[in-house]
Image (cartoon, rainbow, N blue to C red):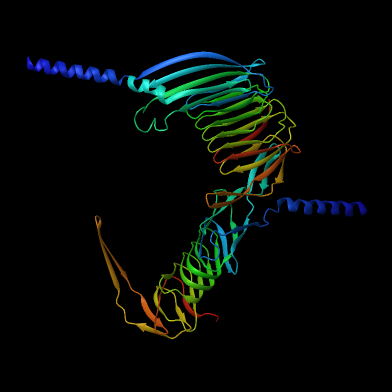
Amino acid sequence: MRKIIIVTVYLMLTVSVVAAADPVTESNVWTEVYPVTATTPSLYISNIWGNVRVRPGTSGQISVTIDERRSAPDQKRFERSFEMLDLDIQADNQGVSFKVGERSRDWGRNGACRGCRVDYQFEVLVPPGTQLDVGTIIDGRIDVAGVDGNISASNVNGPIAVSDIRDCESLESVNGAVDLSFSMAPGQDCNIDTINGDITISMPSGTGLDVALDQFDGRMVSEFRVEPLAFPAQIEQTSDDGRQRYRIQQSAGLRLEGGGPTFSISSMNGDVRIQKSQ
Amino acid sequence: MRIDYIRITLVLALILGAVPAFGQNEPQMITIPLSKPGEQLTLEIGMLSARIEVIGEDRADAEFAVTVEDGERKIVTPSGTKSLKGGSYALEVEEEDNYISVDTDWRANKVTVVARIPRNADLDLSTTEDGEIIVSNISGNLRLENINGPITATNISGSVIAESVNEDIDVSFTSLDGDSATSFASINGDLTVGLPAKAGVQLHIDSDRGEIFSDFEVDVQPTKPVIEREDDRGGVAVRIESVIVANVNGGGPVIKLKTLNGDIQIRKSGN
């Protein structure tokens, strides 16, 4: 009889532990439309987990569909994740800002919400002329196509694909590839930076470009006519809390088809390919 | 004939015109005011491949002339593979509290740094490939390391620790700091030490296959091999070191000289 009680208590304990350890997930999908009146509205997205996809929409509004998937190792931490990981949305007639962030810097470290995660998949339609500054960090892809405003994009562990655009300002990835294609010859300077990814730039035939190239271990391929170009060394001086820093920087230069805006392209281990649009 | 002459002139003009476009070897100049002018500074330069020259002068700031050798990149184009001359690099010079460091990033080819600094300075200079270290007119403690290139230091007041694997070390002192260690070591290079005529030092010489020359009369001291025993988990290591100990002008600060295949020369400074 005593043995039966012990076994029963043991089984109850086991069941309760399993129940407590069940991961909890919750998904929500919603769409918001934000009216904007500025001639060059802005869209800012700072994501942690998940994709950012941007396409052209209609004038006067930014339409966003957000797919949120919140997960935690147990119910207690799931509830706590609302206090620690949130989506901050700021909107006015100039544009919209989405920032996925932690309210507490120690949310992942102190164990209070270890294993908590909130994936956001952003699907955005932007009006003509929208300036984009979008980024994600983990398990995400930046996918922008067909927009005509200026673009800045960043990713840490995934790719950046920006196609059929007019101009870019800054594209930065650490471990992902950067694919960039222009609908017409670009008119302004752009920085493209990766550590381990390949960089592919597609431009209409006959596009002129100057390239400041910083490359260590990859190959450089160009379908355009190329000639060498000498860039002068830049000396930059900064001062910070009693420390003076002087930096001399020089890039290898090349000119495509008679030259144009300057693209600063940097990759440590990736290949760089500049090709003609199909 | 006239047309040919004009063509040749045009081609030459084009070639000459193109040269400055690739002439990226002009030195970049950086002048840094010191946080504590007049006080001892420390200069650290560590680069993979570099010619490092440090010159002590009567000045209150530090001036660096930096040149980086052109690199070459291959570009695959529709008309074939082309070479792109001109390197890409970044070099940083930092100063904080009279401590100056010079460093390059991973892209730089061989760098030449000529540093003109106040005479009172401690130096920590190192390079590995195809390098050269040259120091003159410095008063302080010097640590100089050049794996595959020579080390030359003249008009030094203080102490020097210099190490090379395959090349010569040549250091001449105006005076020695008796409180700090002075040591020269090379596997395959010659060691030359210049001392003031009246300097009193004690030489500890460890030379395996080379010859030893001295401008000074030396008083060789009786010595016994030094035996060091280290007990370790894997067994016992016994190291026996036998050096020649010789006093110059009655002895004084110790100078260690160690080489396997090189000669050792003790010279009177100025000779």
- Which quadrant of the figure has residue A270? top right
Q: Is residue B13 above or below residue B270?
A: above
Residue at the image position 57 percent from the left and 48 percent from the top: B107
Residue closest to the far bottom: B217
Closer-to-camera residue (A146/A248): A248
User: On the rendered structure, is A148 left or right of A177?
Assistant: right
Residue at the image position 52 percent from the left and 59 percent from the top: B98
Residue closest to the far left: A1
Residue B167 visible, this angle: yes
Residue B209 position in % (x across, y down): 42, 73
User: On the rendered structure, is A38 left or right of A20?
Assistant: right
Residue A135 position in % (x across, y down): 54, 28
Q: Is residue A6 above or below residue A273?
A: above
- Which quadrant of the figure has residue B184? bottom left
Closer-to-camera residue (A159/B159): B159
Residue at the image position 71 percent from the left and 36 percent from the top: A261
Q: Is residue B40 above or below residue B13?
A: below
* Quadrant of the drawing holding the N terminus of chain B: bottom right
Residue B112 position in % (x across, y down): 60, 59
User: On the rendered structure, is A116 left or right of A124?
Assistant: left
Q: Is residue B98 above or below residue A9?
A: below
- Which quadrant of the figure has residue B183? bottom left
Closer-to-camera residue (B209/B204): B204
Residue A1 position in % (x across, y down): 7, 14
Closer-to-camera residue (B237/A15): A15
User: On the rendered structure, is B182 left or right of A5?
Assistant: right
* Quadrant of the drawing holding the C terminus of chain B: bottom right
Residue B1 visible, this angle: no
